Image: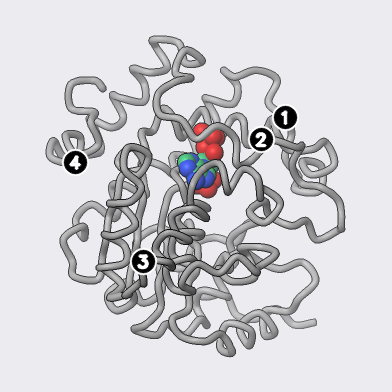
């Protein structure tokens, strides 16, 4: 098989979860809704919130990925053409999850963008558990090794730097009319208000009954009870995560003791180096959190 010509470097380098060819050929529509959240900052929660609002509280889906696909993630048993055909066949408004940077996001100026940010310390710890909660088989299939210690994981997380790129890249666009930026911490404190804000942003009108259903289906308790619908389905038929993983604890700041004071300072220093004071303030990191 002849490999297609390499796409423009703006679409990023190929990896296990990032197919630049898909991005280059994806045709965005103004009605599309893209979740552009950094890993572990509440991406899945927002997949559910958007799907619930758009569907008026549907609970008949078996996997959130059937109704809100991961845009740039290659499918092992499906050709790129078939994936793109599936995207074309989706009804409006289509909803996608992506971990693309601002530059890599297709149609970033015309589609509707929803971003959730979360304290980087909590994202880092959540990511550690994400890997540790995968099954041995899941990790092996994904080509991931369990880190030998939290310190080893931490060094890799910092070197990868996805959280920092996400916030830095989107921050200048936060006031664009097609962008809605929410904080995980605010959603935890008051889910009703968060859902009303998202619905208003989308121009969605929910009846009282629908709104109550949406709220219930987006609660941590409901998502935990239905964790199988939110955990990515493996492409070999086995379990990717151990029971209780993925929709895990959903807390704010409760596990930061896992970080040494020096590790915490490393995160906060990188934030101070890369982000504007207003952004640090917004994230609650201005005075060292
Ligand atoms: P924890 O690992 O801290 O529990 P992502 O979807 O971006 O990978 O983020 C996963 C994190 O979001 C996990 O955090 C998960 O528990 C949390 N989460 C998922 N659904 C949630 C909900 N309904 N309410 C609060 N947190 C939720």
Give the label, 1 or 2, closer to the camera: 2
The circle drawn on residue 38 is none
Looking at the picture, tell me which residue is in the foreground, 49 or 221. 221
For mark 4, what is the residue?
Answer: 279
In terms of image quadrants, where is residue 189? Answer: top left
Give the label, 2 or 3, closer to the camera: 3
**Where does residue 236 sit, x and y in percent of width and height?**
86, 58
Discs 1, 2 touching: Cβ within 8 Å: yes
Question: In the drawing, does residue 192 fall left or right of residue 286?
Answer: right
For mark 2, what is the residue?
Answer: 131
Ranked by sequence position, the earlier of labels 4 and 1 is 1
Mark 1 and mark 2: Cα distance apart in space: 7 Å
> Which residue is pictured at 31% across the width and 62% down the height?
198
> Crowding near pointer 4: few (<14 within 10 Å), some, many (20+)?
some
The CB of the residue at mark 3 lies under 8 Å from ligand 1: no
Ranked by sequence position, the earlier of labels 4 and 2 is 2
Ranked by sequence position, the earlier of labels 1 and 2 is 2
């Amino acid at each position: 098989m002849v490999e297609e010509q390499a796409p423009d470097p703006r679409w990023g380098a190929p990896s296990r979860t990032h197919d630049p060819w898909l991005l280059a050929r994806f045709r965005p529509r103004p009605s599309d809704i893209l979740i552009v959240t950094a890993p572990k900052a509440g991406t899945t929660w927002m997949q559910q919130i958007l799907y619930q609002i758009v569907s008026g509280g549907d609970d008949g889906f078996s996997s959130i990925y059937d109704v809100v696909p991961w845009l740039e993630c290659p499918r092992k048993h499906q050709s790129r053409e078939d994936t793109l055909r599936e995207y074309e066949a989706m009804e409006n408004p289509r909803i996608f999850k992506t971990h693309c940077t601002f530059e890599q996001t297709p149609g970033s100026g015309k589609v509707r963008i929803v971003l959730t940010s979360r304290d980087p310390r909590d994202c880092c710890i959540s990511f550690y558990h994400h890997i540790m909660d995968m099954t041995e088989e899941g990790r092996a299939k994904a080509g991931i090794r369990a880190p030998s210690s939290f310190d080893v994981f931490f060094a890799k997380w910092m070197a990868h730097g996805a959280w920092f790129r996400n916030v830095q890249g989107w921050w200048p666009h936060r006031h664009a009319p097609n962008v809605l930026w929410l904080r995980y911490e605010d959603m935890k404190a008051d889910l009703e208000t968060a859902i009303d804000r998202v619905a208003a942003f989308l121009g969605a009108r929910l009846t009282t009954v629908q709104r109550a259903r949406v709220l219930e289906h987006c609660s941590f308790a409901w998502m935990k009870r239905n964790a199988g619908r939110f955990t990515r389905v493996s492409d070999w038929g086995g379990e990717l995560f151990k029971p209780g993983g993925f929709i895990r604890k959903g807390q704010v700041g409760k596990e930061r003791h896992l970080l040494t004071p020096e590790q915490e300072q490393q995160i906060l220093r990188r934030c101070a180096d890369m982000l504007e004071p207003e952004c640090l303030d917004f994230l609650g990191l201005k005075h060292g959190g």
